[in-house]
Image (spheres, rainbow, N blue to C red):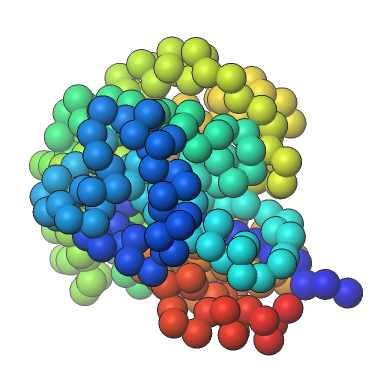
Amino acid sequence: MPRHISLVFPGQGSQHIGMLEGIDSSLIDEVKPIVNSALDFDLIDLISNGNSEELNKTSNTQPALLLSSYLSFRQLKSLIDFKPNVLCGHSLGEYTALVIGESLNLEQGLKLVHQRGLLMEECKSGSMYAILNCDLDKITNYCQQVQNKLNLVVSPANINSPKQIVIAGHIDAVEEVILMLKNDGVRKCIKLQVSVASHCKLMKDAANHFEKVVNTISLKLPTIELIHNFNASSSSDIDELKSNLIKQLTNPVQWIKTMQYLKRKNSIIIECGPNKVLTGIAKSNDLETTVSTSTDDHIATLKSLL
């Protein structure tokens, strides 16, 4: 019986200059007219020859990661014949999953995430920290205490694994929670290099404007089962799909629940895109059969698994 296959697509933080270097030039040439039609700047040149400061702007990062992950999948599919059973994307990666699942075409996807990034950049500045080896309930409790005390936003944003939770919110509120955690003996709190605090209530205005954008585009239900960040479930209709995308901006990424779902499927997890962030997170959720397209031996590894 063929193994169950899940594709996962990374979000912001995995990007880097030169992340298309391993992609066949013919694939890049094929999509170049689509990319140039979708955006008013040269995305491929930015990825290949730009500087990190420009690439790391949210409105540039999002289409850059979508394109890179999409091409990683296309190249993998050209080398190995396989049929994915489930699609998952972490944060921005959910939109790559929508393109792979044919809910959106590539041009629609690039336009949509660029607009999403612009709206996020207009929100109040905030902060995000990754907290390692601390119980979610403790983190949530401290966030609630600080919210009540300061009347500012701070909450879990990425529930990645039992060993890694990311919080987001107003800068002062986030720093207060980190201080309380450190005073309680939590040793590893890592500040993320972002100016946009994703997946919390600071994104409310962006979500309201983004809803109007989403309602102007033609979406289809995915041809492959797609698990959403908001509820770790699939959508039964277009209205639910749109609602899940909008709610994703202001609510935490339920990645532990997503990984638990894939574990029940005994899935081979293939991370398509730059770096190996999701491969590491999968392993910290006790999923061992993982492959990243960023490793040199991924084709041989996948052939042996399949």
Residue located at (46% from left, 32% from top)? 107
Q: Quadrant of the C terminus?
A: bottom right
Residue located at (61% from left, 70% from top)? 79
Farthest-out residue, right: 1
Q: Is residue 243 above or below residue 277?
A: above
Q: Which of these two is toward me, 182 or 257?
A: 257
Q: Is residue 75 above or below residue 12?
A: below
**Residue 247, image x, y percentages:** 47, 30
**Residue 163, image x, y percentages:** 41, 70
**Residue 160, image x, y percentages:** 44, 60
Q: In the rendered image, is residue 250 in sight?
A: no
Residue located at (43% from left, 35% from top)? 34
**Residue 2, image x, y percentages:** 82, 72
The part of the image, by quadrant, that contains residue 118 is top left
Count the marks.
0
The part of the image, by quadrant, that contains residue 278 is bottom left
Q: Is residue 273 above or below residue 101?
A: below
Q: Is residue 301 above or below residue 194?
A: below
164 displayed left or right of 266 = left
Q: Which of these two is toward me, 90 or 36?
A: 36
Q: In the rendered image, is residue 190 in sight?
A: yes
Residue located at (12% from left, 54% from top)? 51
283 displayed left or right of 264 = left
190 displayed left or right of 268 = left
The part of the image, by quadrant, that contains residue 290 is bottom right
Q: Which of these two is toward me, 20 or 16?
A: 20
Q: Quadrant of the N terminus?
A: bottom right
